[in-house]
Image (cartoon, rainbow, N blue to C red):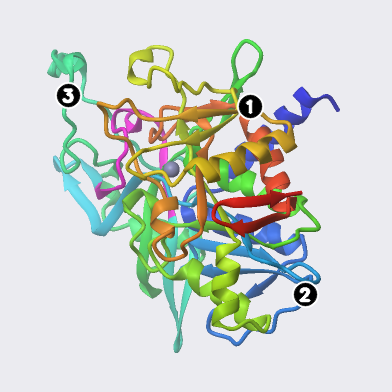
């Protein structure tokens, strides 16, 4: 198959993954299924672990974060990790979500999760998905749910009723963003609809984390079919590429780790986010289960490396002035290495040099990103994870447009580049000699 065909096929696979991942819970479930298929064994944090050389395992926390790892045969010096995030900005259903409106509609009370572009949520079919907790006798059972049909919609106000709208509008989440669920006859039926989709009784639902999601299908487009658009590209494009590369790298020299963490969009400080002990707990337990003590753990951390993979802004064709004058990544131009003097991105001279060497080994292009010096940028998970697991880290991502829209755009080539780079990273022996010196082979 030609490289171009391979890239398109991979993008098709990514789009299916995105469409089947309406929420972080579904993304984690899909990755777990893929890992099981590849022979990985699920570990529970509640149990005692017996790990084997050459073993492949994964752990899930809160159904929304996942850490998979492979233990090599023989000696190993550290952890080679790639981390991305499972969540995306959306609207979360509040408790008692139904609201009667104008005596003729039922609308839903929702609140913002993360910082989204509001405008593109209007006038398109949406639905509801997430996690339920169900009573089952003495047990409480978590169950994923997706109402897999066009269910709700947020209609715009007509131009005639706000002639100034195209001159700029400040969206009010409590007024403008509430979706219509049905006519007045629909009152009292929302939880029944949700329960039916989950095949449970509505009275057994004791808890829910439910989000709106965009129903518009993903598509590959452009003169040469070089672009694709879909929901949740940030950051499931990186999560997908990390997993593909991780699975393809069959004989690693280190313990390789594929981590996908929740709650990046709201600052990561939850029990399953990058600011939790999740990653640290798993690394510590691997070290201990393989017979390592505290000194072995610290020695291994000193020889470890983290690729923090979260999507980056490509230069927008209509807003070239918003990008830095000399670091201008473009869609399909390759993996973006992100820099920030104040260390919102953890990249430094050493970690950049290591990552560039990986890209060269994989024969994939890389480019660089920095914010304009007069603009504050976003943040990501690398520097937050570093406060718990202090290892040499590079921040990277794939270039995209319309970040935090419910329909984002990225490049068909770039996913392929990151899969190749991830595979090369997980397969490269990276030996730290101290004082910032490394041997790579
Ligand atoms: Zn992101």
Provide the secondary structure element on which disc 3 rests.
loop
The percent coordinates of residue 171 (x first, y second) are 19, 32
Q: Which residue is mark 1?
A: 412
Count all numbered tags in the image, as a single digit: 3
Mark 3, Cα crowd under 10 Å, few <14 / some 14-19 / many 20+, is few
Provide the secondary structure element on which disc 2 rests.
loop
Residue at 64% x, 65% y is: 78
User: In the rendered structure, which disc, 2 or 1, sits on the residue that comes first in sequence?
Assistant: 2
Mark 1, Cα crowd under 10 Å, few <14 / some 14-19 / many 20+, is many
Residue at 63% x, 58% y is: 433
Does residue 356 sit above or below 139 in this rendering?
above
Q: Quadrant of ligand 1?
A: top left
**Residue placed furthest toward the front:** 435
Is any part of residue 200 visible from this angle?
no
The percent coordinates of residue 179 (x first, y second) are 28, 41
Q: Disc 2 or disc 1, which is closer to the eye? A: 2
Q: Quadrant of the N terminus?
A: top right
Tag of residue 53: 2
């Amino acid at each position: 198959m030609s490289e171009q065909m391979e890239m398109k096929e991979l993008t098709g696979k990514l789009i299916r993954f995105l469409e089947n991942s309406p929420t972080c819970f579904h993304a984690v479930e899909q990755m777990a299924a893929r890992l099981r298929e590849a022979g990985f064994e699920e570990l529970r944090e509640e149990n005692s672990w017996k790990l084997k050389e050459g073993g492949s395992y994964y752990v899930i926390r809160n159904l929304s974060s996942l850490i998979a790892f492979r233990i090599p045969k023989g000696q190993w010096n550290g952890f080679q990790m790639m981390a991305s995030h499972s969540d995306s900005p959306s609207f979360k259903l509040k408790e008692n979500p139904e609201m009667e409106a104008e005596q003729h509609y039922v609308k839903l009370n929702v609140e913002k999760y993360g910082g989204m572009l509001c405008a593109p949520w209007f006038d398109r079919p949406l639905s509801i998905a997430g996690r339920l907790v169900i009573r089952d006798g003495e047990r409480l059972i978590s169950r994923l749910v997706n109402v897999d049909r066009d269910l709700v919609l947020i209609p715009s106000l007509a131009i005639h009723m706000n002639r100034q709208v195209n001159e700029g509008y400040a969206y009010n989440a409590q007024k403008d963003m509430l979706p219509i669920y049905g006519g007045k006859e629909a009152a009292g039926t929302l939880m029944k609809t949700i329960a039916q989709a989950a095949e449970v009784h509505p009275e057994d639902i004791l808890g829910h984390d439910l989000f709106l999601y965009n129903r518009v299908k993903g598509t590959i487009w452009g003169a040469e079919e070089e672009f694709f658009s879909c929901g949740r590209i940030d950051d499931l494009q990186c999560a997908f590429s990390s997993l593909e590369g991780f699975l393809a790298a069959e004989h690693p020299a280190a313990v390789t780790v594929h981590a996908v963490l929740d709650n990046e969009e709201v600052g990561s400080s939850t029990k399953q986010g990058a600011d939790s002990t999740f990653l640290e707990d798993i690394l510590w337990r691997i070290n201990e289960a393989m017979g390592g003590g505290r000194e072995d753990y610290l020695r291994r951390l000193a020889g470890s490396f983290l690729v923090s993979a979260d999507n980056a802004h490509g230069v927008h064709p209509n807003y070239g002035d918003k990008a830095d004058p000399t670091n201008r990544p473009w869609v399909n131009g390759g993996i973006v290495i992100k820099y920030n003097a104040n260390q919102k991105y953890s990249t430094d001279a050493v970690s950049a040099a290591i990552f560039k060497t990986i890209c060269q080994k994989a024969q994939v292009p890389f480019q660089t990103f920095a914010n304009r010096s007069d603009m504050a940028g976003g943040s990501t998970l690398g520097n937050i994870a570093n406060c718990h697991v202090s290892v040499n880290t590079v921040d990277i991502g794939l270039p995209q447009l319309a970040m935090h829209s419910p329909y984002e755009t990225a490049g068909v080539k770039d996913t392929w580049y990151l899969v190749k780079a991830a595979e090369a990273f997980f397969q490269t022996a990276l030996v730290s000699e101290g004082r910032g010196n490394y041997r790579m082979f």
